[in-house]
Amino acid sequence: MQGGSDEVVEALRRGDLAAAPVDDAHRALLQFAQLVTQHAYRTTPDDVEALRQHGWSDPQIAEAVYITALFAFFNRVADAFGLADPGYGS
């Protein structure tokens, strides 16, 4: 929906970051989002610096954290109320 190729969307839907055909900068950002999703307490200044080295600005990194956190929030609310994605699995 946001302009990603079918291959990228499918790899991410499967949770297979390694198979997603993206450049190194986007792969680093996706891996950081995965870290924030699964183990936010393990993020370090070195993780943020690695993103900077890939060309991401501090506002872009912050936005990635905010979006990742919002998706976690929305997913937990949907799970708590038993809401299902009407398009999932079809």
Image (cartoon, rainbow, N blue to C red):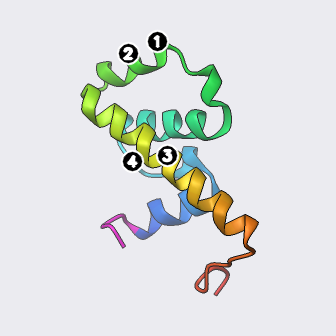
Name the residue carrying label 1. 46
User: What amino acid type should be assigned to the residue bearing mark 4?
Assistant: Val
Seen from this angle, which residue lies furthest top? 46
Magenta-colored span: 1-5
Instruction: Determine whether the residue tagged by mark 4 lies in a helix, strand or loop.
Output: loop
Which one is closest to the eye, mark 3 or mark 2? Answer: 3
User: What amino acid type should be assigned to the residue bearing mark 3?
Assistant: Thr
Position of residue 2 measured from the top left corner of the image (x, y, whole percent): 33, 67
Kindly indicate whether the residue at mark 4 contacts the one at mark 2 (C-beta within 8 angstroms). Answer: no
Kindly indicate whether the residue at mark 1 contacts the one at mark 2 (C-beta within 8 angstroms). Answer: yes
Name the residue carrying label 2. 49
Give me the C-alpha separation between circle 2 and circle 1: 5 Å
Which one is closest to the eye, mark 1 or mark 3? Answer: 3
Residue 49, compared with residue 88, is above or below; it is above
Q: Quadrant of residue 59?
A: top left
Q: Quadrant of residue 26?
A: top left
Name the residue carrying label 4. 22
Viewer-side residue, 46 vs 75: 75
Specify few, some or many for label 1: CA neighbours under 10 Å numbering under 14, 14-19, or 20 or more: few
